[in-house]
Amino acid sequence: MTTTLNKAPRALKAAGLAALVAAGTLAGALAGAAPAAAEDKSPWMLRVRGVAVVPDEGASISPIGGDVSIDNSVIPELDITYFATQNIAFELILGTTKHDVRAKGTSVGGVDLGSVWLLPPTLTAQYHFIPDGKIRPYVGAGVNYTVFYNEDTPAGIDIDYDNGFGFALQAGVDFAIDDHWVANIDVKKLFLNTDVTINNSIKADVDIDPWLFGVGVGYRF
């Protein structure tokens, strides 16, 4: 069982996201032009990131009460971006993550609920402020559909997770290395909710709502 890591306060995380957007926008406004203009490039871009997935979880569990604890993870992420115009792009975010889950503070004490894999493909629409600058901030918003699979539960416990749609917010900055390559910093907030049934008798309404903090590289064709 992976030890559950401490979660940063929600206010601090929200402030970090706002600061990233503000700093990136200001830096982009001050940045000079890159060697190649955006209109001279292919509309396709690929990014690979290492991403820390930090759930901002909470739950309502009936009839035993309590809350839920979901551990953090670090995963690789692949992103495919299509620039419809110089400033407007659409990004498909692909990655999968495994989390250990535990019920806590219930009327029967803490309960190990095993682990589950999440596959949350996410599509965002982005606005790139300075697409041909050396520093290229962007923001985005979109939707995701989360699939839960490969549950590994303790003996005597059967758990069913409902798949479902959610929303996503995003902010990031590309730093031009040359005409094609960029370094990237990206923050996403996913709003994920699932209805969970345990042993066909216990119901839980679980908000996972993870933060995704990513660092990686991208290639514009």
Image (cartoon, rainbow, N blue to C red):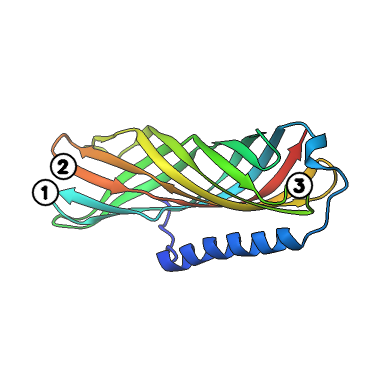
Which sits earlier in the primary sequence, circle 2 or circle 3? 3
| Residue 4 in sight from this viewpoint | yes
Neighbours of disc 1 within 10 Å: few (<14), some (14-19), many (20+):
few
> Which of the image's four quarters has the C terminus?
top right
> Pointer 3: what residue?
182
Q: Earlier in the sequence, mark 1 or mark 3?
A: 1
Mark 1 residue type: Pro
- Nearer to us in this view, 147 or 157: 147
For label 3, the crowd category at 10 Å Cα-Cα, with few meaning under 14, some 14 to 19 and many 20 or more, is many
Residue that appears at 18% across and 42% down: 203
Q: Quadrant of residue 28?
A: bottom right
Q: Secondary structure at mark 2?
A: strand
Disc number lying in front (1 or 3): 3
The x, y position of residue 79, in whole percent, is 62, 37
Relative to the observer, which residue lies in front, 190 or 51? 190
Q: Position of residue 111 (x, y in %)?
A: 24, 51
Q: Secondary structure at mark 1?
A: loop
Q: Tell me the tag on residue 202.
A: 2
C-alpha distance separating marks 1 and 3: 51 Å
